[in-house]
């Protein structure tokens, strides 16, 4: 058997061009099949890992997906604010264990600024039970305190004590800067591999203070704005926030509370269960997944058929070879095995190359995908689905390989030693 | 013990039509036999029966002490690989293997051939035989870079390595010019002498006939009258 393997290997190597083309087309289809699947699972795990232990996400009345995307993944913007009094109402609701308020709208060189309170450091969880931890410093407590996500800190080389001038709005190059009210970095978070890394956290008071004098939506005229040293927490009044996270006391109360929030008389609100909304998102994207998988399967079939054709047409030139192998004592069955082995080798090498390429690309792109599009992609291992794909590719190749192999078997038996 | 003993053997590629009917063919061990006959007379077919690639319709085909008609296909293959060396008219070599690998193939495949070599390793045995045949310097070349004469000598090396008891050569000289035919035949006979193998040499060209112990005409041993 080992001899056969070596024969098959040498035979393929001698037809290097055809072999590598076939290997390439199979590798390409495997790359597509597995790449699509890995990205899908990576994105799913990335999204799912971003938020844990939160039962409800609440924001102004609107679509559930946008609400989830802007409040947790920082993709897109809130359509409307909600009043702080509504937040207080549900914060103090007996069914609620804890809440985390978020207020967004400002940015720093393209990174989001999120105003929140101590509850965030206390209760926010990701990847099941991880909480945010400090690499240096501590929580933002003063009005002009800021805590940086690890990526922001790394990007600008900031440490505690650094001063930041935040921009109004989310554009990278904002026309309006809060230059009159610089923030001081009091803490830097450890890396979480979630959108937290790309966020600057300030207090809700800080958010309010920043906009003192901005009531018209534009910066106050020179000399009009009160100096930062004069702004005191007591004077600030928090009117609105963008959304908040809720942890309820039990599963059953989650559903009841969701109903209650959705029918809240005070103002139109939307409460979503994040896991369900994500599930809806994946179902929606499922069609894309299926379409891409179909395309990659088609590429695979083309690759396998190309292999079949190249092996089959080579058979006529290989009749001599078959006769020689018979003469040195190979059984017709071994000739069959030799030809099948060639297909198995081609498809196996193709599958391995495709697999390695898929992981290489995933590895190369998960960073940029996260920082440029805010799409968290987890590096996921092999799944049963990938194993099934690889198995199917090799099985398909083996099956295709049987066609030239059967013919080689017949040549071996019928043409005997007279094959010219 | 006879090397080859055929009794009442008949064979035909098509069901109805017999191509060969051989009442008796006896070749003793160690004999140098020249088998001749016109093209299409069934020489290669007869070799196929002896090598156990083709199956006789009736009769007994006894080769080197084994009755092939009672052996399974795979046992016949093993018998052929371990006890016989076979040389074709041309294109004897596997194109994607080196000369060395081509020669070593029977030893790779059959323990019996491996065990019979006298040198300390297969590689050494290959080198020894190759230098006997004057192809020592080509051993690591791809076979496609060899001349026909050189290729045929590589074929001898592969046929005799591991001392098979029967060497069959099917018109091995017909692609060579007269000088090379002489040289080829001399080397083939020498090497068969060394291992005391029986040699069955087929040709339609009877100028080489005198070099053999015995000459057999296929048309004479075959009772089927060609139509
Ligand atoms: N595989 C085969 N199938 C059918 N007929 C064959 C086959 N091989 C040879 N023949 C026929 O058998 C006859 C004898 O062929 P062969 O034994 O090759 O003769 P030789 O070797 O003496 O030239 C020829 O008529 C040839 O056409
Ligand atoms: Mg012939």
Image (spheres, helix red, strand yellow):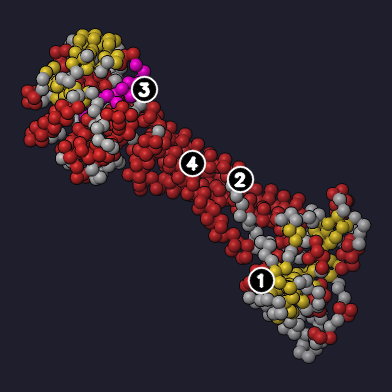
Q: Is residue A93 above or below residue A340?
A: below
| Labels 1, 3: one chain | no
Between marks 2 and 1, how big is the CA–CA gap?
33 Å
Q: State which quadrant residue A123 falls in.
A: bottom right
Residue A38 is situated, as x and y percent measured from the top left of the image, at 59, 51
Report the chain holding disc 2.
Answer: A
Q: Nearer the viewer, mark 2 or mark 3?
A: 3
Q: CA–CA distance between discs 1 and 3? A: 72 Å
Question: What span is colored magenta in the figure?
Answer: B71-88
Position of the N terminus of chain A by quadrant: top left
Whether the residue carrying mark 1 lies under 8 Å from ligand 1 is answered with no
Between residues B66 and A60, which one lies in front from this camera angle?
B66
Q: Secondary structure at mark 1?
A: helix
- The label shown at residue B74 is 3
Of the pair A223 and A217, the residue shown nearer to us: A223
Find residue A383 and name its label. 2
Expressed as whole percent of the image width and height from the top left, the position of residue A120 reads 79, 65
Which residue has dot 4 on it? A301
Of mark 2 and mark 4, the one earlier in the sequence is 4
Distance Cα–Cα, label 2 vs label 4: 22 Å
Q: Are marks 2 and 3 in contact (CB under 8 Å)?
A: no
Front one among B50 and A67: B50
Q: Residues within 10 Å of mark 2 (few under 14, many from 20)?
A: few
Foreground disc of the pair 2, 4: 2
* Beta carbon of the mark 3 residue lies under 8 A of ligand 1: no
Q: Which mark is residue A152?
A: 1
Seen at 27% across and 29% down, the residue is: B116
Q: Residue at x 86, y 50 (%)?
A: A250
SS type, badge 2? loop
Image quadrant assignment for residue A197: bottom right
Q: Chain of mark 3?
A: B
């Amino acid at each position: 058997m080992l001899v056969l393997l070596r024969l098959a290997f040498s035979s393929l190597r001698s037809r290097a061009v055809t072999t590598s083309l076939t290997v390439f087309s199979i590798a390409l289809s495997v790359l597509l099949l597995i790449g699509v699947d890995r990205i899908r699972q990576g994105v799913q795990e990335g999204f799912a890992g971003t938020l844990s232990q939160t039962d409800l996400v609440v924001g102004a009345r609107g679509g559930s997906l946008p609400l989830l995307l802007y409040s947790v993944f920082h993709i897109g913007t809130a359509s409307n604010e909600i009043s702080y009094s509504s937040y207080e109402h549900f914060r103090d609701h007996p069914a609620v264990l804890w809440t985390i308020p978020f207020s967004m709208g400002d940015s720093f060189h393209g990174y989001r600024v999120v105003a929140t309170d101590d509850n965030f450091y206390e209760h926010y969880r990701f990847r099941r039970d991880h909480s945010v931890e400090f690499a240096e410093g501590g929580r933002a407590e003063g009005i002009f305190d800021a805590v940086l996500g690890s990526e922001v800190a790394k990007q600008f080389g900031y440490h505690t004590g650094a001063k930041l001038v935040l921009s109004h709005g989310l554009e990278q190059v904002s026309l309006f800067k809060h230059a009159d009210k610089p923030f001081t970095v009091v803490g830097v978070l450890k890396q979480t591999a979630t959108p937290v890394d790309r966020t600057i956290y300030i207090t809700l008071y800080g958010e309010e203070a920043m906009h003192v004098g901005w009531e018209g939506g534009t910066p106050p005229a020179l000399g009009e704005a009160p100096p930062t040293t004069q702004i005191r927490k007591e004077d600030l009044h928090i009117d609105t926030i963008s959304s908040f996270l809720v942890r309820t006391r039990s599963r059953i109360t989650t559903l009841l509370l969701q109903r209650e929030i959705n029918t809240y008389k005070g103002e139109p609100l939307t409460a979503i269960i994040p896991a369900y909304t994500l599930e809806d998102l994946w179902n929606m994207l499922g069609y894309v997944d299926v379409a891409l998988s179909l395309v990659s399967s088609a590429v695979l079939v083309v690759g396998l058929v190309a292999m079949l054709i190249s092996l089959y047409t080579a058979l006529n030139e290989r009749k001599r070879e078959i006769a020689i192998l018979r003469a040195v004592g190979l059984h017709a069955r071994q000739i069959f095995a030799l030809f099948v082995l060639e297909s198995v080798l081609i498809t196996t090498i193709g599958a391995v190359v495709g697999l390695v390429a898929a992981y290489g690309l995933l590895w190369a792109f998960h960073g940029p995908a996260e920082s440029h599009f805010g799409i968290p992609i987890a590096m996921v291992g092999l799944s049963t689905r990938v194993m099934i794909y690889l198995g199917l590719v090799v099985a398909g190749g083996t099956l295709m390989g049987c066609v030239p192999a059967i013919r080689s078997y017949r040549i071996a038996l019928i043409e005997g030693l007279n094959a010219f | 013990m006879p090397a080859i003993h055929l009794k009442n053997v008949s064979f035909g590629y098509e069901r109805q039509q017999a191509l060969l009917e051989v009442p008796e063919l006896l070749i003793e061990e160690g004999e140098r036999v020249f088998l001749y006959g016109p093209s299409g007379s069934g020489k290669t077919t007869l070799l196929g029966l002896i090598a156990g690639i083709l199956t006789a319709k009736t009769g007994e085909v006894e080769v080197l002490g084994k009755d092939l008609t009672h052996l399974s296909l795979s046992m016949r293959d093993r018998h052929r690989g371990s006890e016989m060396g076979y040389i074709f008219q041309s294109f004897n070599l596997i194109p994607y293997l080196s000369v060395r690998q081509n020669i070593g193939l029977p030893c790779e495949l059959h323990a019996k051939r491996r065990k019979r070599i006298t040198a300390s390793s297969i590689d050494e045995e290959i080198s020894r035989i190759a230098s006997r045949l004057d192809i020592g310097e080509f051993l690591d070349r791809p076979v496609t870079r060899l001349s026909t004469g050189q290729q045929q000598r590589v074929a001898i090396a592969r046929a005799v390595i591991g001392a098979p008891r029967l060497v069959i050569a099917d018109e091995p000289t017909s692609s060579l010019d007269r000088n090379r035919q002489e040289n080829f035949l001399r080397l083939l006979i020498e090497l068969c002498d060394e291992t005391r193998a029986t040699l069955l040499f087929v040709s339609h060209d009877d100028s080489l006939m005198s070099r053999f112990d015995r000459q057999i005409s296929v048309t004479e041993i075959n009772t089927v009258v060609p139509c």
